[in-house]
Amino acid sequence: MFCPSCGKDNSLELKFCASCGTNLEAVSQALTGVEEDFFSKMDSGMDYFIARYAERVFKDAPHGLAERGVKKSWTILGQAVVTSLVDILLFTLMWSVLPIRFLILLISTPFRMLAQRGREVGHQTLSPSYISPELPEGDSGLWLDHIGTSVTENTTKHLASLSVTETKSTVITDKLRD
């Protein structure tokens, strides 16, 4: 449906224009002359509800719900009946499988727990205790374990001699300025 305000082509499922927000449902009612009463609203609501239920089996069930027609309503109803039959089949299948699974778990759980406990105990007793290897003494010449000369030691000696000469030069420059 084309919006009368902005001219954008919108799908039939939309109630409002995607571009400008104009109420397309009111425009549709004005163009067709059909006003939705209580029964037509209930009919479309039920079709929507049933289509959402049938969507689990028929993926395209809710599509085309804007097409209001008897044929579409019967199609949706037929899809819902088939979906109900599939649900009943799955329900009976699950009620047959669930008790069997329960009995299998009831019988096998003690044996599985004992086997699991036996594996845990077996791993603890069979594993040898870890003994750390003894390392030989290293060559003392390779490691710097003795205190050598410091980097700052020589630097401070040079700074001290530099500061004495610097003070002499500042005294000389001060005398020249005077």
Image (spheres, helix red, strand yellow):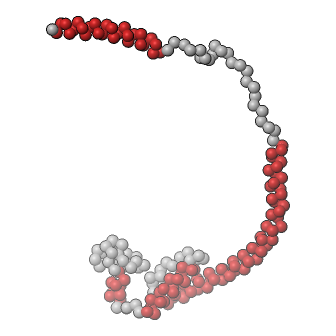
| Quadrant of the image containing the N terminus | bottom left
In this picture, is 116 found above or below 176?
A: below
Residue found at x 81% / y 54%: 117
Residue 17, how many percent across, how many down? 35, 75
Quarter of the image where one finds residue 18: bottom left
Q: Nearer the viewer, residue 149 or 125?
A: 149
Q: Nearer the viewer, residue 76 or 140?
A: 140
In this picture, is 147 found above or below 104?
A: above
Q: How many marks?
A: 0
- Left or right of residue 142: residue 126: right
Quarter of the image where one finds residue 109: bottom right
Quarter of the image where one finds residue 106: bottom right
Q: Nearer the viewer, residue 116 or 178?
A: 178
Residue 9 visible in the snapshot? no
Residue found at x 53% / y 76%: 60
Residue 40, how many percent across, how many down? 45, 91
Residue found at x 26% / y 8%: 169
